[in-house]
Image: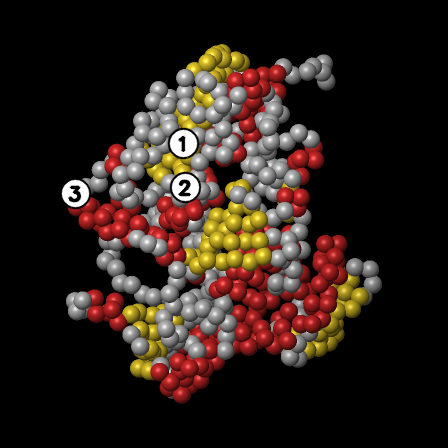
Amino acid sequence: MGNIALLDKQTIDQIAAGEVIERPASVVKELIENAIDAKATEISVEIRDGGINYIRITDNGRGIMKEDVPLAFTRHATSKIRTIEDLFSVHSLGFRGEALSSIASVAKVELLTKTKEAMSGTRYVIHGGEEVVCTDAGIPNGTTIVVSSLFYNTPARRKYLGSANAEAGRIMELMQAVVLSHPEIGFKFVSQGKVRLLTYGNAKEQGRMESIYRVLGRDIAKYLVPVTAENAFASVSGYIGRPEIGRGNRSYEYYFINGRYIKSKVIENAVEDGYRGFFMQHRYPVYVLDLSIPTEDLDVNVHPAKMELRLKNEAEVYELLADCVRKTLQNKEWIPQVQLQPAAVQEKQPSEPAEEEKPRAEKAVFSYLPRDFAPRPQTLKDAAAPEPFEEKKIAERSRALTAEPRTDVAQIRLPEKVLLQEDTLPDIRIIGQVFDTYWILQLEDKMYLLDQHAAHEKLLYETLLEKLRSGQHFTQRISPPVIISLQPMEERRLEKFLSDFEKLGFEIASFGGREIALSAVPLDLPDLGSAEAFRELLDSLDEVRGMRLEKLLARCATISCKAAVKGNMRLSGAEVQELIRGLMKLEDPYHCPHGRPTMISMTKQEIEKRFGRT
């Protein structure tokens, strides 16, 4: 072993920077959080080359006093906390005290800042952690930071960055999350000279729906449903998407804890479990949720980038979210409505909102920006002009967006008569069956197609689950009992959930050491009587989610699928009417156990449009 030596300051700073600053998006995140903590109401972000060579962030916040500027670039210098105890009750976003120091150690940084009280501002330049200039400057209130040549002095790290487009995409994703988490702040995001995202921060007037529209687009915003709930440990509010707009990945899942964009498996699992049964496999929900949790119940300092956290009361927060989502989705008519579109019309991707969706208001934005240091004040008219044939579409969208009340894009107006309710049954006309599988129903000005297999499968599935929940099931004995040797983790799980197993109809006894004797299983689920199947069931248990037995539910779904009436089987009208009556008793009759719709609908207006009648 060689001699032990202290590392020099530059090396220490660069190692610290590696924990906080991974890529250009990390820089943008840290600086935006500082701007928000400085009480900015308008924040402008401009990047070039994906932020690798140029990032500029300007805000109208409180600014930094001249004597504090050099100190702000020192490691562990912060205005947010004073003692270790403050870490457990911090309410700000950027608190670690390493952001500016870390950024300055691996880039060239220019800071322009002025407080409201100061006669003049300060210009401060620092390259690679070494101060270059500190002088007075005539600038407006607020702060502008220009970060250039990221990782210029650490080429090994620079080469691991993605392409300019990939890095710009990561910053765009970050900006979308920030806009959604702070609808009260006006944001402008410019990439390669083009405005990519623009909001006005009018949360008091429009609530979060304005920012949701800007980020996710109208086609998603109109399918969102408001939610709110609370318990002794947390409260939640926001919007969840109707099941019909489920996505193929989690990129539309947005959740914030005390205003912080964060990552938490507990939260993701809770919301997705709330949607269980409303989606087909490998589909994920769309949602924007705000959680408020006491700061003493959070540890936000788990990850250097402050993106992950621990929750003290995980189970209680999980239950709040899962129940909130489930109760919102249940007992509502989630029947997908078919809308025929020309093949050329494709779904718009919300990651880059089309220019024509922006309102044409002649409102100047970010007029406080210094002439010498920021983009010139713009109106929305200065943005790239659309093609002439788009003018009509723009005017229509602008009128719809600015109409009062603006939040109506989020309201779901259910029909006066819901298909699956008792007083509607006499008005349902059973027209007939097509392809020996789908039944045509009519109610008022809507036509419905009912999938007889999916509907019967859901009815059998819910009947079986109700038996298991209520203890109205029968037990099937296993002779001789199955002897299973458990691993320590399996043993702990079984001990924790033994009473739940017994309620379902299992009979389990100790057989000495770590072995158990399984002598009975629920009558309706006989294939759980093998050691392998029982272990799978134990493995599906979750310490936070508890006895939500995915494996057990999967078995129930399989049994229901096998027992249900199949497609290409003829049913009588009376049998279909009885099937409809059975569906009416379910909390969610609109999705089979696998998440497929049991029925779809089409309006009379849509049909007439296709025949040229309207």
Dot 3: element: helix
Examine the rendered structure and indicate whether residue 372 appears above or below residue 478.
above
Separation (CA) of disc 1 from disc 2:
15 Å
Is 322 situated left or right of 365 in this image?
A: right
- Residue 169 seen in the figure: no
Query: In this rendering, which labeled residue sits more in front, label 1 or label 2?
Result: 2
Residue identified by numbered label 2: 201
Give amino acid for label 2.
Answer: Gly
Q: Quadrant of the N terminus?
A: top right
Query: In this rendering, which labeled residue sits more in front, label 2 or label 3?
Result: 2
* Residue 26 % position (x, y): 50, 32
Mark 1 closeness class: few <14, some 14–19, many ≥20 residues within 10 Å: many
Point 53% across, 21% down: residue: 65
Separation (CA) of disc 1 from disc 3:
30 Å
Mark 2 closeness class: few <14, some 14–19, many ≥20 residues within 10 Å: many
Separation (CA) of disc 2 from disc 3:
30 Å
Dot 2: element: loop
Dot 1: element: strand
* Residue 118 % position (x, y): 48, 20
Residue identified by numbered label 1: 45
Examine the rendered structure and indicate whether residue 208 appears above or below residue 450.
above
* Residue 478 % position (x, y): 71, 75
Give amino acid for label 3.
Answer: Pro
Q: Quadrant of the C terminus?
A: bottom left
Q: Which mark is residue 388?
A: 3
Q: How many marks?
A: 3
Examine the rendered structure and indicate whether residue 599 appears above or below residue 368.
below
Examine the rendered structure and indicate whether residue 457 appears above or below residue 362.
below
Point 44% across, 25% down: residue: 141
